[in-house]
Amino acid sequence: MLTFESTHTIDFTHPIPNALDIPYVTADEAFTLLSTEFGRFGRLLETLEADDWGKPTACTAWTVRAMLAHQAGGYASGRLPGIVAAVHRQAQARPAPRRRHQ
């Protein structure tokens, strides 16, 4: 079992749901999720101490500093607003999910 920020838990003892049974998020939900996670990411960065920057990440070839540089490069490129807009458009254009089970 993995726990994130003490409020999010993944229980691997239950079967993984079929992806077709998971409802699509709406455009507004996608934007809210992206905005929320971006804020959490910023708050996390504010907690880093000097010795944290050289620590490894789950991407074993990347340190915290390298991962942040990668993220910051994407944000600094000016592409983030375009990505948010694309996610929003894509979520709006999705058809209703097909259900195999009712």
Image (spheres, helix red, strand yellow):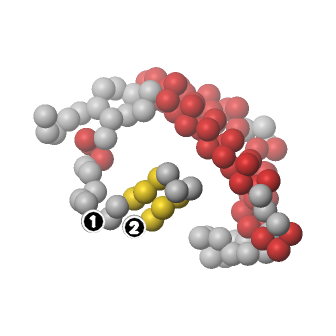
Q: Amino acid at mark 2?
A: Met
Local secondary structure at mark 1? loop
Local secondary structure at mark 2? loop
Does residue 53 appear to the left or right of 16 in the view shown?
right
- Residue 65 at x, y = what percent? 79, 66
Q: Are marks 2 and 1 in contact (CB under 8 Å)?
A: yes
The residue at 39%/28% (across/down) is 94
Residue nearest the observer in this picture, 35 or 100: 35
Quadrant in which the N terminus appears: bottom left
- Residue 92 at x, y = what percent? 46, 23
Residue nearest the observer in this picture, 40 or 18: 40
Farthest residue in the right direction?
50
The residue at 69%/75% (across/down) is 56
Can you identify the residue that label 1 sits on? 13
Residue 1's tag is 2
The residue at 50%/26% (across/down) is 27
- The answer to whether residue 59 is above or below residue 85 is below
**Callout 2 crowding tier (Cα within 10 Å): few <14, some 14–19, many ≥20:** few
Residue 33 visible in the shown view? yes
Q: Earlier in the sequence, mark 2 or mark 1?
A: 2
Quadrant in which the C terminus appears: top left
- Residue 4 at x, y = what percent? 53, 58
Residue nearest the observer in this picture, 81 or 48: 48
Farthest residue in the front direction?
6
Does residue 84 appear to the left or right of 11 in the view shown?
right
Q: Quadrant of residue 67?
A: bottom right
Residue 74 visible in the shown view? no
